[in-house]
Amino acid sequence: MNTIRDTLGNASDCLGRFLWGANASVALSDLLRGTSLGGRLRELAGRSVLLATQDHLTAALALIELDGIARRLVVCPPDLSSEHLPAVIAKAGVDAIVSDRDPHDQGLGVPLRVFCSLDITPGGGVPVDRHATDWVLLTSGTTGAPKLILHTFAGLTAPIKSGQHQGADVVWGTFYDIRRYGGLQIFLRAVLGRGSMVLSSADELPGDYLLRLGAHGVTHISGTPSHWRRALMSPCASTIAPRYVRLSGEIADQAILNSLRAVYPQAGIGHAYASTEAGVGFEVNDGLEGFPASMLALRGDVDMKVEDGSLRLRSARTALRYLGEENSALTDDEGFVDTGDIVELRRDRYYFLGRRTGVINVGGLKVYPEEVEAVINRHPAVRMSAVRSRRNPIMGALVVAEVVLKAEPFADLTREILQLCHESLAPHKIPTTIRVVPALDVAAAGKLTRHHA
Amino acid sequence: MSIRSTVISLLQQIAEEGKKKLPPLTDGLVLLDSGLDSLAIAVLVARLEETLGLDPFTDSDDISYPVTLGDFISLYEKAAKSREHDSGHAG
């Protein structure tokens, strides 16, 4: 068993390696000699630990310390609403919380709470019982409640090729949060390699992050196509000169690939296909959108097939299962994960068309139409609604809604519906247009017909 | 209404919906410094497509993403001109 700490080695092996946050930075050698957990690592050994920090860098420190110590690490994304915490705690059998916030959640019934901070205190290196840590990542589900996805550390790190992008001079950056699958992949590449990393901050303007990336000499950087479009709209885009630019989490179209090539002519540009459930599927490095059909025939780390129009993947990188939903299978009988992404073969290449289930991908964030429809349907004048995806060149897709009314429309109707949405939904889930229609397509089974984008 | 005034009035409408206050809308204003995030700019692009029937971002694989409000407006003005040109040929 190789943990993050095992790979980092001794403090002297990590001289000159840093994790840079928006307001603070930590030398990896200091962390290896000390602790961000106030010397309480031993108490967390063998536990199922919920990591819920506000600060991005603090989360990074705790992940390094807890891998190989905790029995299970439940990694909360920064925007997880506290109303979902009790269900997450129950499903993952959480018996300890690591957080950088004051305990305002005493009612959760978790026996152990450990404070985690950017102040590294002496006291690391104490021998502690070791466990192969399970990693649990969260993605949003149909009702807005998160789904818990169980990975092994071996599965998470399987896509990381030794020797690739791992020079001592490599400085990683990502527009993602490392508490999501796409960001975690970059964090693991940074800490398991020999380089450093610049972490983003949720309350930082895109230009400010680019300036910090430039100041630390970022060489390798990842984000969704939407992150990259936003970056290219910043006057600070030219403050970085990366050697490697990576896109994932959304369909990379030819326009963004061409623009990145024009702005960063010196960089290798690749787009990766990955999902929290299926893991990293593949990387495409030929500068073109979609992927070559010949990849389906390759026998390597990942098996690919297209069935019923959607892409399916099987590999050691795939998650083990959902937690707390024992009846919903993650793979088919042959071990393939149906990604739900519809692909179309044109000549010798496959192109992504959208999602089978109607899930809308707004700048890398999933929106389940059912969740938005449930909010719209609360308006007393609405009989039913259908929420769909509309292609958008900036965010990949936006949410639009059609509603069928119980009576005649009135002047303030759409404003009232939008008001309801503003009160109960995150900004990216709010429909950008609401259209009143006489009827909606309902399939024979009584369900709304959902078309992919 | 000119393209410039359409862009500006939609921009103001979106800011109002999001309860954001806009700085003075000069050509040199950096879009991402206008207080609107990229989601709001995406909504602006969608509404401009509805209003003007133009989407310069999708019509070409080779665009440079606009940094300032002036860049943004001229992207749409160019798209409108090239449409007039095309329809002139067709008709």
Image (cartoon, coloured by chain):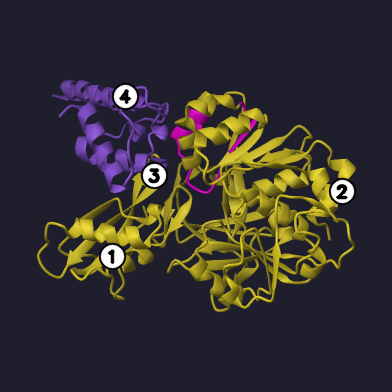
Chain colours: A yellow, B purple
Amino acid on which the number 2 mark rests in the picture: Gly
In space, the residues marked 3 and 4 are separated at their CA atoms by: 21 Å
Which quarter of the figure has residue A76? bottom right
- Counting from the top left corner in percent of width and height, residue A324 is at 58, 76
Q: Are marks 2 and 4 on the same chain?
A: no
Amino acid on which the number 1 mark rests in the picture: Ile
- Counting from the top left corner in percent of width and height, residue A162 is at 78, 44
Q: Is residue A190 above or below residue A419?
A: above
Q: Which of disc 4 and disc 3 is earlier in sequence?
A: 4
Q: Secondary structure at mark 2?
A: loop
Amino acid on which the number 4 mark rests in the picture: Thr
Q: Chain of mark 2?
A: A
Q: Which residues are magenta?
A: A241-261
Q: Are marks 3 and 2 on the same chain?
A: no
Q: Chain of mark 4?
A: B
Q: Which of disc 1 and disc 2 is earlier in sequence?
A: 2
Amino acid on which the number 3 mark rests in the picture: Leu
Residue at which label 2 appears: A9
Q: Nearer the viewer, residue A2 or A103?
A: A103
Report crowding for label 2: few under 14, some 14 to 19, many 20 or more residues within 10 A (C-alpha).
Answer: few
Residue at which label 4 appears: B26
Residue at which label 3 appears: B39
Residue at which label 1 appears: A376
Report crowding for label 4: few under 14, some 14 to 19, many 20 or more residues within 10 A (C-alpha).
Answer: few
User: Do residues under tags 2 and 4 come within 8 Å of each other at their CB atoms?
Assistant: no
Q: Secondary structure at mark 4?
A: loop
